[in-house]
Amino acid sequence: MIKPIQAKMLMFDLDDTLVDDGVATETAAKALFSKYQPQQINDALNHWKRALKLHYPAFLQGKLSAAEMRQARAREALQDKSLSDEEAEQAFEYFMQQYIAATILYGDTLACLNQLKQQGWRLALVSNGPEDMQQRKVRAAGLLDYFEFVLTAEAAGAAKPKPSIFQQAAKLAKLSVEQCCYVGDNLVNDAQGANAAGMGSVWLQRDASSEPEHQPMDEVNWKIASLNQLHQCTWLA
C-alpha cells in the first residue's frame, strides 16, 4: 500500500488552486476594455492574456519591477504605447479593482481549509503573483486567517519552480523542506518544483475526475482532482 505524504505543514498555491483566477481575469478584462477600449471588448481577454504572456515572465525573472510590469501590461493590453506611467497605473488599478471584486473561491476551498485547521495542520500560501495583488486577493477572499504567512515571488526574490522560494517558505515556518508538502495546480511550477526542492507534492488537476493517484514517475507524489481528496494522500506528522 502506498503511504500518504507525512508532513508538519501544508503549503498552497493560490490562483487556480484556491481561487478561480480564470473567472476573475475575464470579468476584469472585459470591465477594463469597456472603459478604455469598448470597440475591442470582445477581444479583451485575448489582449490581456497576450500582455501577461509577454511581460510577466520578465517580472518573475527579476528583469522588471512590479510597477514596470503593471505599466507594460496595461499599455500592451490596451494597445496604447502613449499611456504615461501614471495613466498605465490607473488603468491597471482599475483592472485590479474589478479583478478583486470578481475573485471567487472554488467550492471545495473552505471545506478543505477548515478541515485541515481542525485537524491541527499548519498552513501557508506560496504564490508567484506580485505582492500587492496577492495580498489584496487573499484578504478579499477571506483567506488570510487560515495561513501563518503568505510568501510571494516578489517578496522572496525568486519564483516557482526555483527551489529557493520553497526553501524560504520552509525557513519562515522554521521547518525543513522535508517536513512540508506543497499543493498546486501547475505541474511544473508547483508539483515538480516543490518536489525538486525536497518537499512532498500534490498536483491538483481540477479538470480530472479520478480518484487520488500516486504517480512518482512524474516527479510528483500524488495527483488529485479536488481538494476534498487531499486528506487521502497527506498525514499530519
Image: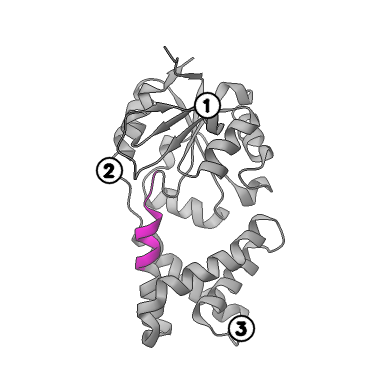
Residue 72 colored in magenta in the image: no
Which residue shows up at 49% across the image and 45% down it? 186
Residue 229 x/y as whole percent: 33, 29
Q: Which residue is mark 1?
A: 216
User: What is the number of the mark on residue 197?
Assistant: none
Q: Which residue is mark 2?
A: 107
**Magenta span:** 18-27
Which amino acid, mark 2? Answer: Gly
Q: Nearer the viewer, residue 83 or 195?
A: 195
Which residue is at the far right? 63
Q: Is residue 100 above or below residue 198?
A: below
Q: Is residue 75 above or below residue 148?
A: below
Is residue 172 in view from this perspective?
A: no
Which amino acid, mark 3? Answer: Ser
Which residue is at the far front? 217
In terms of sequence position, does the residue under pointer 2 or pointer 3 come before the other?
3
- Tag 2's secondary structure? loop
Residue 170 image-quadrant placement: top right
- Tag 1's secondary structure? helix
62 relative to 115 in the view: left or right: right
Which residue shows up at 50% across the image and 51% down it? 135
Which amino acid, mark 1? Answer: Pro
In terms of sequence position, does the residue under pointer 1 or pointer 2 come before the other?
2
Residue 35 x/y as whole percent: 39, 82
Residue 213 x/y as whole percent: 40, 27
Residue 52 x/y as whole percent: 54, 65
User: What is the number of the mark on residue 84?
Assistant: 3
Residue 65 image-quadrant placement: bottom right
Chief SS of the magenta region: helix
Q: Is residue 107 above or below residue 80?
A: above
